[in-house]
Image (cartoon, coloured by chain):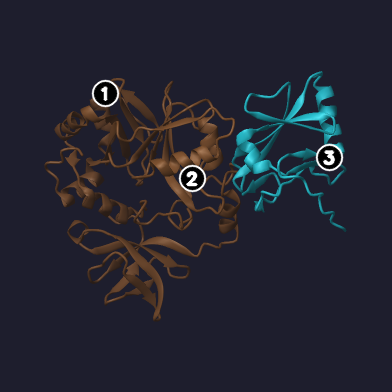
Chain colours: A cyan, B brown
Amino acid sequence: MTTQTPPAIPINTVKITEKAASKVKEFALAKAMPQFGLKVSVKGGGCSGLTYVLDIVDGPDEADKVIHDEGIELYVPKKAFVYLAGMLLDFSDGLNGKGFTFSNPNAKKTCGCGTSFSV
Amino acid sequence: MIPVTKSHSRAAYQAALGGAAFFDGSHLTRIEHRGADALDLLHRLSTNDLLSLGEGGVRRTVITTAEARIVDVVTVVRRKGRPILLIGSAGAAQRLLEWLDKFTFAEDSEPRDRSSELAQLTLVGPESPRMIASLAGAEDLVLPGGACGEIAGNLVVARTDALGIPVIELVSQQSSVGDLARELEKSGAVAADRAAWDALRVARGAPEWGSELDERVNPHEANLNGLIDFQKGCYVGQEVVARLDTYDKVQRRLVTVRCDTPLVSGAALAAEGRKVGEVRTVAAPEILDAHVALAFVRRGHWDPGTRLAVAGGGNAAVVSLPLA
């Protein structure tokens, strides 16, 4: 088994892969949302302290940083951006896939299931 | 401070076990936690299940770091139609507010320190529920363990039973705490002092921030397992808390020791010439008729009956709890 090193992401943004963006579009289509963006945030909790939160929404909130990537808009709340800057959001499918995955350079420790991290 | 005029430590201790005694709890932290997401946030940050805590319920929980170190032990008082009241350790307000803020992103959560505006008495003993009923003017009212209520719209009563006997926190306005203390005394409760409180804690293995608890201790070490819900799922610190339990990795535990000579806080406890523990809170000997104290001891030395040498002289043994 080989491990691919994720590409370096500038630390002033959050990126999404083509595959993950396509999955988001699929979900938005299923929800019949003509206008949508992906809210990428964190919340307190999870084993390691912070948990990733993804949500398809119809627009940004006032305190969101708006990022355009792979044909979709990412909305990152400014307070959460501190913990997410430089992150690559990907999607892993198949029988052993993990769904959305997070390569976050700010995460010093990640819990077993990969959805919780500490900085 | 409330006017404690007739305090007598031994009598107060005995009243707490056989009748009722009340303690000044004004030095504790009281935070009013408003917001639709307040309970959910607390649930995600602490060891006990709070999502099942309905209105009118009270539950103690331990807020832990990702490394399972204790931020504070708090009592969550979920009042009906009112903001949550959090009761924390003395001097914990800033620590708790900063911790809650650190984990608040999009949540509707507004905690506010109300420690200085509110006063608090802790009523302990089997007669406590009856006294609360009397205060409420409803003699048949029974405040069960884990429940809270309000009397006359401004006195919060919250039954925690934190010491394994009836314990009711009474939170009032500063201006009315003197009258409340007099009412309790009239009902037969004994005004108690710090020495009686510490004796109760030592006799029942209950830790307190500053003496036994700090940011280096985890809940397993401090006899707080009863405040951990192992089924609730993820919360900050859960992985470490669960691992310590599953793999039996707890390295020290809080116990109560009895000694044949006076004990002092900080004294080392040894076995076979090696330090294996340290004395913490010492109970006043005149209250319990014995030299007893809370102590942290290392693995292999915490079972009741284990003999330990006290630095400076004296033989101690770990005792079963609770002491009478």
Q: Quadrant of the N terminus of chain A?
A: bottom right
Above or below A14: residue A5: below
Q: Residue furthest left?
A: B6
Residue at mark 2: B63
Amino acid type shown at disc 1: Ala
* Residue appearing at x 43%, y 46% in the figure: B72
Dots 2 and 3: beta carbons under 8 Å? Answer: no
* Residue appearing at x 25%, y 46% in the figure: B17
Q: Nearer the viewer, residue B232 or B119?
A: B119
B165 left or right of A82 in image: left
Give the alpha-carbon distance from disc 2 to disc 3, as whole Å.
37 Å
Asked if one can make out residue B302 in the rendered structure from this viewpoint, the answer is no
Amino acid type shown at disc 3: Thr
Mark 3 crowd level (few <14, some 14–19, many ≥20, 10 Å Cα): some
Residue at mark 3: A17
Amino acid type shown at disc 2: Ile
Dots 1 and 2: beta carbons under 8 Å? Answer: no
Q: Nearer the viewer, mark 3 or mark 1?
A: 3
Query: What chain does mark 1 sit on?
Result: B
* Residue appearing at x 43%, y 26% in the figure: B83
Residue at mark 1: B136
Disc 3 on helix, strand or loop? loop
Above or below B198: residue B75: above
Asked if one can make out residue B107 in the rendered structure from this viewpoint, the answer is yes
Query: What chain does mark 2 sit on?
Result: B
